[in-house]
Image (tube, helix red, strand yellow):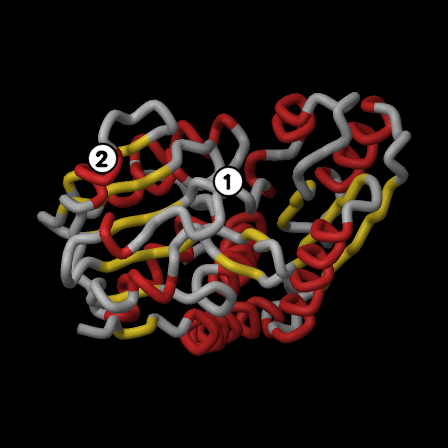
Amino acid sequence: MTAQIIDGKTIAQQVRAEWKVRADALKARGVTPGLAAVIVGNDPASKVYVANKVKACAELGMYSKHIELGSDISEAELLAEIAALNSDPKIHGILVQLPLPKHLDAHKVIEAINPDKDVDGFHEKNVGALVTGETPFPSCTPYGVMVLLEKTGIAIEGKHAVIVGRSNIVGKPMALLLLHKNATVTICTSKTVDLAKHTRDADILVAAVGKANFITGKMVKPGAVVIDVGINRNAEGKLVGDVDFASVKEVAGYITPVPGGVGPMTITMLMANTVRAAERLSGFSK
């Protein structure tokens, strides 16, 4: 068996086209969806991520504001920047690129964002709404995974989904989104005993652990759907995921590649959340 590759790039373009229709409808009514991206410091990876988000805004005809701040900025100054964006009518979505320098309290910064503009879905209000299934802004990476599954025609209801990793950004919200679609969900952590036993039970396996090639073919149930959320650099500097692609693709039924799998969907769903925020804030919500 060789797994069918889930092409995140192609699906992301399809989804962006769908959301561009909604963005254009807003523009026809005088509202241009606007996203502000705040980056603190000189982390190269963060700069690439933000640049890609700004590019995506341009593709959808959206307004974007890119704010670069020095790594020595005070917390009060950063909070003042966020307060200004909260009150800016041209901005419907605000994201602060993580991680932040250690002297800044990331939780305090995220909580300062107007939850109606929290398109990353990290504010406590939106996290709480995610628990009840009512959030307008699902966390972008798990949201992207759900859309990948949907567009690929993969059934979720009644399936056993196993998530390796429990981060607030991916693991926990991923579990909630799958639960809302009636999956049976298991979350594995670094302390899980006999991890491979759990992963081999998975109909849908989501790897979000941050370790290159961590999931091998021997850890996967034949025919399983394997979603690789990891982004790592190996010893040769090549971009790889948390899944050992070569061995797992010979066992799985479906697999996402790295790059070109989940990554394009994360930015796409950020655009979707921004358009939805613009609809809600302008009173044109669907």
Q: How many marks?
A: 2
* Vertical position of residue 24 compared to residue 54: above or below: below
Residue 186: percent from left, percent from top: 22, 35
As measured in the structure, the alpha-carbon distance from the residue carrying label 2 to the one carrying label 1 is 22 Å
Residue 271: percent from left, percent from top: 55, 60
* Vertical position of residue 72 compared to residue 35: above or below: above
What is the number of the mark on residue 186? 2
Quadrant of residue 23 within the rendered picture: bottom right
Q: Label 1: which residue?
A: 121
Give the crowd class for mark 2: few <14, some 14-19, many >=20 residues within 10 Å: some
What is the number of the mark on residue 206? none
Is 228 in front, or is 282?
Answer: 228
Q: Residue furthest front?
A: 235
Residue 178: percent from left, percent from top: 25, 45
* Secondary structure category for the residue under label 2: strand
Q: Amino acid at mark 2?
A: Thr
| Mark closer to the chain start, 2 or 1 | 1
* Secondary structure category for the residue under label 1: loop
Is 257 in front, or is 71?
Answer: 257
